[in-house]
Image: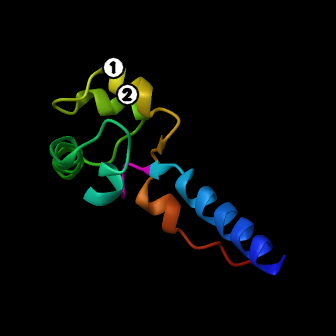
Amino acid sequence: MKQLFLMMTLLFLFTGAALAAVNINTASQAELEALQGIGPAKAKAIIEHREKTGAFASIDDLAKVSGIGPGTVKQLRDAVTVESEKSAEAPAKPE
């Protein structure tokens, strides 16, 4: 019974991590490649676009990346997010 509980707990933890949205403004090549429809070439294009033009302001900005069209953006909409590095890392203001 303990093993069953442990297995279910681990499954729950790993499922939660797998369902977390990927921040396209900070994601690594490997994180981007884990997205459905994004292979090595598209992941590299996303990173190069981000480095050249700055952070993505919205998910729709992915369509500006060479090789990514509206269909891919639609497919990725629920799997990605566009938080800026500053807002993701900003410490809480002291009172």
From the top left corner, tell me how far across and down residue 27 is, in percent. 35, 57
Tell me how far mark 1 sits from mark 2, CA to CA. Answer: 5 Å
Q: Which residues are magenta?
A: 23-27
Question: Would residue 28 be visible to someone looking at this image?
Answer: no
Callout 2: few (<14), some (14-19), or many (20+) C-alpha neighbours within 10 Å?
Answer: some
Which colour style is shown?
rainbow
Q: Is residue 21 left or right of residue 84?
A: right
Residue at the limit of the structure toward the top, as seen here:
70
Answer above or below: position of 71 versus 32: above
Q: Which quadrant would the N terminus be assigned to in this image?
A: bottom right
Answer above or below: position of 25 versus 85: above
Q: Which of the pair 89/7 is nearer the observer?
A: 7
Residue at the spot x=16%, y=31% of the render?
66
Q: Which residue in the protein does label 2 denote?
A: 73
User: CB under 8 Å between callouts 1 and 2?
Assistant: yes
Q: Which residue in the protein does label 1 denote?
A: 70
What mark, if any, has residue 29 been given in the picture? none
From the top left corner, tell me how far across and down residue 74 is, in percent. 43, 24
Q: Is residue 54 left or right of residue 92?
A: left
Q: Amino acid at mark 1?
A: Pro
Q: Is residue 17 magenta?
A: no
From the top left corner, tell me how far across and down residue 33 is, in percent. 30, 50
Residue at the spot x=66%, y=70% of the render?
10
